[in-house]
Amino acid sequence: MKQIVTPFGTFLTDEVLADAICRYSRALARVHDSAFVEIPYRDAHGLVRRVVLRVGWLVSIDVASSTLAAEKVDADVIATEIIRWSEEVERREAIGSSNPYDPIDGKATR
C-alpha cells in the first residue's frame, strides 16, 4: 500500500495505482495539462471509499510508502487504464503535439 498525499488529504491505496497516478500527473505536467481521476482508497476505518483527484500541471501531489497494514484495494483495472492514459500523454509529448487529447472520451480538451 502507498499513500497519495495532497494538500487536502492523504489517501491510502494500492501501490500500483499510486505509482500510476504519479506517472500520469508528471506526464500531464510536462505538457502543461491536467485531468481528474477517480480512485478507490481506504479510509481511517478501513472502508473502501472513492475520491476524485486533480492531477497534472500546477497540482501538488506526491506518493509515499505506507507502513499501515490494510487490506489491498482492488484497483488493477483502474491502474491499467491510468497507465494507458500516461502512455498517450507521453506519446503526445514525444511528438510535440499541440492538440491536447482527453484519454477519457477521446476528444480534444481545448
Image: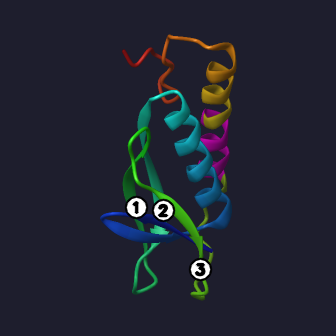
Q: For mark 1, give the secondary structure.
A: strand
Gap in angstroms between the C-alphas marked 2 and 1? 4 Å
Judged left or right of residue 59, residue 80 is right
Q: Residue at x 44, y 14 (%)?
A: 108
* Secondary element type, mark 3: loop
The residue singled out by tag 3 in the image is: 66
SS state under label 2: strand
Q: Residue 50 bears which disc, if any?
A: 1
Mark 3 surroundings: few (<14), some (14-19) or many (≥20) residues within 10 A: some
Question: Is 20 located above or below residue 35 in the figure?
Answer: below
Quadrant hosting residue 48 = bottom left
Q: Tag 1: residue type?
A: Arg
- In the image, which disc is placed on residue 36? none
Residue at 40%, 61% (x, y): give it.
50
Choose the circle earlier in sequence order: 1 or 3: 1
Q: CA distance from mark 3 to mark 2?
A: 16 Å
Q: Which residues are magenta?
A: 77-85
Residue at 51% over, 61% down: 62
How many numbered badges does the structure rendering display? 3
Q: Main secondary structure of the magenta part?
A: helix
Quadrant, the C terminus: top left
Residue 30 horizontal/vertical position (percent): 55, 33
Q: What residue did someone put label 2 on?
A: 40
Q: Residue lying at the far left in this picture: please name it.
A: 8
Proximity of marks 2 and 1: CB atoms separated by less than 8 Å: yes
- Tag 1 or tag 2, which sits nearer the N-term? 2
Q: Looking at the picture, how far across and down is residue 89, in whole percent?
A: 60, 28
* Image height of 85 relative to 99, above or below: below
